[in-house]
Image (spheres, coloured by chain):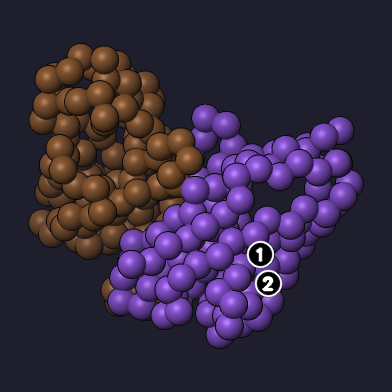
Amino acid sequence: NAGVTQTPKFQVLKTGQSMTLQCAQDMNHEYMSWYRQDPGMGLRLIHYSVGAGITDQGEVPNGYNVSRSTTEDFPLRLLSAAPSQTSVYFCASSYSTLAGVGADTQYFGPGTRLTVL
Amino acid sequence: GEDVEQSLFLSVREGDSSVINCTYTDSSSTYLYWYKQEPGAGLQLLTYIFSNMDMKQDQRLTVLLNKKDKHLSLRIADTQTGDSAIYFCAEKEPGRRALTFGSGTRLQVQP
């Protein structure tokens, strides 16, 4: 299994540009999520999905859109990039039969480092 | 809301024990986790503990949980240079899958 994969690894955008960060997992996990990591602030949840066709907002959703058309893929879209979105983005997935029951061990991708000029 | 706090930096000598501390505010947390992040990499789950346990040991790692004080610690015995990384504490509330992370503790191991 490849686990959780993310592309690209690095990206530089100009203010106002749009782009999609890709995330895929091959573990048949129901739950997928996007976090951003900023210095001194840990990881903050952007959006998450509990299954294909179902998405919801996390702690910091503004400026980002997601969709979940398949179990495997969970892309994150920046519609109009801003310098405040400069960050490292991590995708994570986990498997559980009942929401919130069990350890829900989350597996993380290697991250995408995004710079918005 | 929930909050997870960690000290920013810890330096130890190779062969010594490291103790990384974490405090959290949500008394209903069900699971508490320790993740390791090496430079340029994603987060790797090291271990987790269920909230009704006091201690969990896994090879060189010992997790201690003081639920009364809402304090979690990770002890790494015989610390090696390969243990140099950022260590994140995280908690999970009942009924939620999302984790709340601390800001991370950078562990530096001196040879």
Q: Which element is circle 2 on?
A: strand
**Mark 2 is on which residue type?**
Leu
- Mark 1 and mark 2 in contact? Answer it, CB < 8 Å: yes
| Mark 1 surroundings within 10 Å by alpha-carbon count, few (fewer than 14), some (14 through 19), many (20 or more) | some
- Asked if A115 appears above or below B46 in the picture, the reply is above
- Identify residue for label 1: B73
Q: Position of residue B47 (x, y in %)?
A: 60, 62
- Identify residue for label 2: B64
Q: Which element is circle 1 on?
A: strand
CA gap, disc 1 to disc 2? Answer: 5 Å
Q: Position of residue A28 (x, y in %)?
A: 31, 57
Q: Position of residue B104 (x, y in %)?
A: 54, 47
Residue at figure coordinates x 40%, y 47% from the top left = A43
Residue at figure coordinates x 45%, y 55% from the top left = B101
Of residues A96 and A49, the one nearer the viewer is A49
Chain identifier, colour purple: B
Q: Chain of mark 2?
A: B
**Mark 1 is on which residue type?**
Ser
